[in-house]
Image: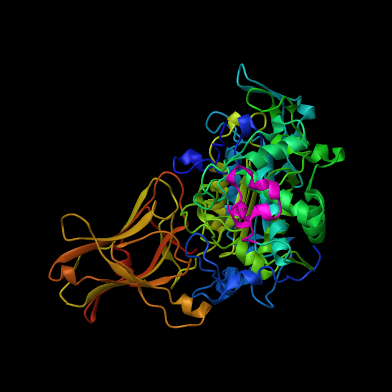
Amino acid sequence: MTGDTNGRAADGRKGAHEGPEPAGGGGSPTDARTAGSGIARRRVGGGILALGGALALTPMPLAGAAARSRPGAGAADRAADTGAGMESGAHRPTLRRGSSARAGLLQGPLDQLVRDAEAYLADSPAHPWYAGAVLLAGRGGTVALHRPIGKAVRYAAYDEKTDTGVEFPADQQIAMAEDTVFDLASISKLFTSLLAVQQIERGTLELEATVASYLPDFAGGGKQDVTVRQLLTHTSGFRSWIPLYEEPTREGKLRRLWEEVPASTPGSAYLYSDLNLISLQLILEKITGRPLDALLRDEITAPLGMHRTRYNPPASWKPKIAATEDARLPWSGLERGLVWGEVHDENAFSLDGVAGHAGVFSCAWDLAVLARTLLNGGVYGRARILSEESVDLLFTDFNTAFPGDEHGLGFELYQHWYMGAMATPRSAGHTGFTGTSLVLDPSTDTFLVVLGNSVHPVRSWRSGSAPRVAAANQLARAVPVRPERGRTAWFSGMASASTATLTLPALRLHSARARLECALWWDTEREADALFLEASAGQDWQRVPFTTLAPGARLERPGPRPEPRPHPAGSATGWSGRVWHRLEADLTAWRGRAVTLRWRYTTDRLYVGRGAYVDGLRVRDGVRTVFDAERPRDAGRIEATGWAPSAD
């Protein structure tokens, strides 16, 4: 077995996660019907049944409402067509091309996104990460970036003796285009999951029912207790894959699945597996009486107008399809030669191209339509494919018992390894082994599609997920963070493997009520990167405990006034809601001494969040203000290393 090293395995923290690779296999990491009672029956007291740990069902952040209500929202924010759509009567936009300003995005980071992506057309480090790609980024109803780069078809074959690609003649190579169609590989799992949630809505599929109650033969091998939810959240116990393509008949493939013994007790561990979605496909086909490709067409792509999305694209599409791999033994499970216009994944290929885990082909614009539909709460134009309640489940973590493996129904959540700085507890998406990815961030109403042909000409040339992370970081940076007051705030930057310090001048404090006050905004890779408040009286630096309060929370939801949040270790890390917090720190421990205060922001070498901002720095010594960054003289005494004034 050759694991997919393009996902989290590359960082040494997690196992392969974007599609297991069978024996060198391929890419495995409706109408306006109203919802039935299927979801409602699973609600208890306004929440979800506890599933493997405490699970709180919280409303999806309303990006449009948040942008309008948060303190300091700027003109670009208000101009953005950011109808997140998760509230009754909210504006639910359809897509159109537009400027970055119309989208409420900054143009500079979008330009950098393209430059970063183009860099991976060259050796990175030993070979190009992809032969080409299509990049699409937007916010609200505006697609502000849609850019093809490189080649859709470049190589005729792979020469394993010299580890080089054998190129087609120049006149036979095909440039990437905006509408180039890609083998999505494991992004196909999202479509299968959406089809399953539709059936849950309609009451024909039970989330907590056993799979064997729909497919009695599935109970073989000790799988009688595996549930539909466990298939959707990769907690069934299935190992990553089995080579179904070795069985010449469909009956043989099913027998292998029925007899498969779980690698772990169902519900006891997270293990990403293609077999979960293949099983889900079989359930869907059983309860609907329709094949999966017909379900995809009738229930999702036709209603949404996704006319370039389907299984088994016709031969006439081939000139507009990105080629994948020169699939030959031993690195591939099958001898196929150049795979171009057919599914790359061996198991999906052996299932006639239609499988729950792989096989869907699509283009960037169609995936943006899907993203917009989900950010709209399940509706696009006049078509509704899911209820708002169902969409909320896609963005709700069911794997609270397995920190780091957050998962909604089918959708991965909060994964920095490919979402980069777009990762939040509600950011949802997926990747595909062929080089594809989709990320949705409800908190900013942004969406990102990166489609690359990274197994062209061979899978061994790809490594890590750097192009996806780079693109996501730049889109996150393109969302403005307006200063809490004034024209600029101090920004830590988003560099990895770095330390940035923001240091105030030495101040002598006399009062028993000395304190630091400021506004603080932070979003970091949780635990790996952190912001520290430190003080020194001439010797070592010491952590300074502080408290934070997010006044914006009172604007977004009714209820009692929020209490200040203590930070006893003098640090902040992870997700803070992307709102400004009011900070206070007690400085009386340094009474009678000259003390120097600093903010220190540290990041590891892998991934980063959106960074940290500090504004309105003020030190009070009782009734006296001994430092105020709004006074030019005081502002000029701040020493910044790595930090910079930022208007956005």
Q: Is residue 564 visible?
A: yes
x then y, percent, for residue 240:
58, 40
Would residue 306 be found to the left or right of residue 213 on screen? right
Within the magenta stretch, is there residue 381?
A: no
User: Which residue appears at 31% of the width and 64% of the height?
Assistant: 636
x then y, percent, for residue 374:
67, 63
Q: Which picture quadrant has residue 439?
A: bottom right
x then y, percent, for residue 611:
44, 57
Within the magenta stretch, is there residue 214?
A: yes
Would residue 616 be found to the left or right of residue 534 on screen? right
Q: Which residues are magenta?
A: 207-233
Picture layout, residue 551 above or below residue 42: below
Q: Nearer the viewer, residue 630 or 283?
A: 283
Q: How is the image coloured?
A: rainbow
x then y, percent, for residue 38:
69, 68
Picture layout, residue 258 above or below residue 641: above
Q: Residue furthest top?
A: 161
Q: Nearer the viewer, residue 632 or 433?
A: 433
User: Which residue appears at 67% of the width and 37% of the height?
Assistant: 256
Quarter of the picture holding the N terminus: top right
Q: Nearer the viewer, residue 205 or 471?
A: 205
Q: Is residue 175 visible?
A: no
Q: Residue furthest right?
A: 316
Would residue 206 be found to the left or right of residue 635 on screen? right
Picture layout, residue 474 above or below residue 577: above
* Total numbered badges shown on the rendered structure: 0
